[in-house]
Amino acid sequence: MKDRVPVVGVLALQGDYQKHLEILDSIDVRGVEVRLAEDFDRVERLIIPGGESTVMTELLGRLRMEDKLASFVSKQPVWGTCAGMILLASGVNDRSVKTLGAIDIAVDRNGYGRQVFSTVAPATLALNGHRESLDLVFIRAPRVTRVGEGVTTLLKCGDDPVLLAQNNVLVSAFHPELTGSALLHDYFARKFAADFS
Ligand code: GLN
């Protein structure tokens, strides 16, 4: 019998959530928009998309979603991309962002510079016995400045770690929904374990 695929929530307050839902749909994973605190009860995994971490911080507070998000992030598989990575980090160089401290990394917001310095970088990703060439899209991406001991770096771009994991948390500095590949979504939805170590 095939394993049941978990329901994947996508935080849908702001940013590039729609594209994540489309990719999940294309690989037969049920994706659900998370817009209210009670929506966390309907999902088993969560993607926090790219967008603006300052705006997400503001909206999470206004919509009173902070406690539910913190509790979800403390135990369920969560994947933060770009702005989502910033929210999950343990430290950021900007006090207008409230980080969750879910993964032991520090990041610099806009660490590669402004929008004009956004780039596309080719990379080869090896995950779970699959290898794929990807174009990594960086849009005002966070730069990782510290990686804690318990954190695994899964992919680097030059010297910079851009895909990392610890326990139940996966983070990517790039926009995986724009790579033209569903490999990472498939990995997160079907394989990523809550006890990643
Ligand atoms: N620079 C944005 C932030 O600080 C992140 C950019 C992105 O998600 N593409 O939140």
Image (cartoon, rainbow, N blue to C red):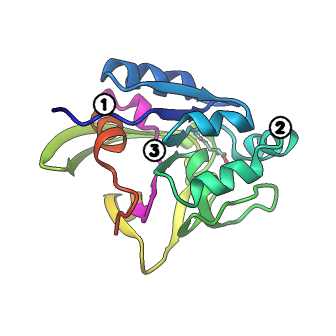
Instruction: Report the front residue among 65 and 107.
Output: 65
The disc at residue 99 is none
Q: CA distance from mark 3 to mark 1?
A: 14 Å
Q: Is residue 70 left or right of residue 102?
A: right
Q: CA distance from mark 1 to mark 2?
A: 31 Å
Q: Residue furthest right?
A: 62
Q: Which residue was labeled with disc 3?
A: 174
User: Residue 85 location in percent, x, y?
Assistant: 55, 52
Magenta residue span: 165-181
Instruction: Kindly identify the amino acid type of the residue bearing the numbered disc 1.
Output: Ala
The disc at residue 182 is 1
* Secondary structure of residue under mark 1: loop
* Secondary structure of residue under mark 2: loop
In which image quadrant can residue 188 be found? top left
The disc at residue 63 is 2
**Which label's residue is closer to the chain start, 3 or 1?**
3
